[in-house]
Amino acid sequence: MADYLTRRGSFWHFIRRVPLEYAELDKRGFVQQSTKIRIADDPKAIRANRKANDYNLALERYWRDLAEGDSAQAVRDYESAIKAAKRLNIAAPIDDATKRTIAELLDRIEKLSGNRVEDRASVLAVYDAAPKPDITFRQCAERYIEAHEAGWSNAKSITAWQSTLTMYAYPVIGDMPVKKIGGNGDGTDLMLKILEPIWHIKTETAARLRGRIESILDWAKARGYREGENPARWKGHLNQLLAAKAKVAPVKHHEAMPYTKVPAFVKRLRAMSGIAARALEFTILTASRTSEVLEARRSEIDLESRMWIVPAARMKSRKEHRVPLCNSAIAIIKSMPDGGAFIFPGAKKGKTLSSASMLKVLDRMGERSVTHGFRSAFRDWGSETGNYPNELLEMAIAHTVGNQVERSYRRGDMLKKRHALMADWCRYCNSAS
């Protein structure tokens, strides 16, 4: 990155030559920009390098957008036609409405680039009228993932989308123009070619893949890249051609420990040493999800109010969740080694325990139940042994309660009652000791 920094007066400046592959799209030759960082304040250019790196990444994105964007494609197509016409010594191809629209778009872009007075809104209006270039299903999928990944709960979602599309969809329709994937006939045949080979042997994967293809094709239609019905839609279409997922592969719920066995299990668990055993015990006492506990940080604990505040970014619902802490849960926190950010640190510095660590504890104890099953045990205990309202129990395990209208009128989270609930659950878990 130091190659892109230069001294100009008393400031560091970013400067970079436009790469040859973008020379036709960016006529500047060199791109220069001040970092606004004084050399005297940053003699080794440490801060300036970081800023120059940001400038460079932004510049790369700009050039890539120029090269891959729809307007650039339209410009390139038209310029290629003009060059071909000149070689053949014939008039430029602007006889039909489509090419006249592109010609007008080029003219307006030229005026804008020359800093001549021109209404940007009118340029956009002309661009909207210009024909969209062909775009493949793979390109649509990549743009769909890029547009939606910020709203997905974790990085595994992105990997799952990319892997299933790469393995099953791209070999069939990856390089096909998305506008040619019609709503019936050939489009349906393509969907069946993708789904039928795995529908009975990898039913869950196939069902998720179908939903992902449907979403991508809907996105392409909304963007104007294709028209007509969606051949990947289930209701009223593929449900007539493929067996229902529930009939092919009935849902198998993860095995949960009966709540009546939890106190005896907790007693055995406390006899085990190790951070993973304490993390599992904490998970049981708080009725939390595995990922929430593994990534729990000391900064989220308020011992004075006996509260663990899980930030929205780590919650499945994307809403902050406050967890009342009982005496046993607080004792676990205080027993953990201090000095790191995580309450339950992994073997490597700065890392959490692995997601399989609690399952290994269960396996060593000869248990077939899964970690998540203790949330079910808590829920069953609350329903069958105590006079706890359903709404209170659902809030305790961070489930969405009621419809949208009901939630809009509910401002509190029944915190006082949940403190009492979790204290009761703690006493029950300790009852075999």
Image: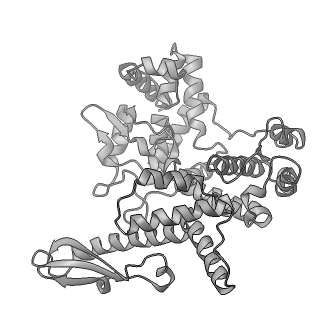
Drawn side of residue 97 relative to residue 153, left or right:
right
Query: Measuring 66% from the left and 86% from the top, which residue is drawn there?
Result: 87
The front one of 292 and 79 is: 79
Drawn side of residue 249 relative to residue 219, left or right:
right
| Quadrant of res 311 | top left
Query: Measuring 37% from the left and 63% from the top, which residue is drawn there?
Result: 350
Question: Dividing the image into 4 quarters, which one contains the N terminus?
Answer: bottom left
Please say whether residue 225 is visible from this viewpoint. Answer: yes
Q: Position of residue 266 (x, y in %)?
A: 51, 38
Q: Position of residue 318 (x, y in %)?
A: 46, 39
The front one of 49 and 377 is: 49
Q: Position of residue 66 (x, y in %)?
A: 50, 69
Q: Position of residue 121 (x, y in %)?
A: 44, 50
Query: Measuring 51% from the left and 58% from the top, which residue is drawn there?
Result: 354
The front one of 40 and 95 is: 95
Please say whether residue 201 is visible from this viewpoint. Answer: no
Drawn side of residue 8 relative to residue 210, left or right:
left
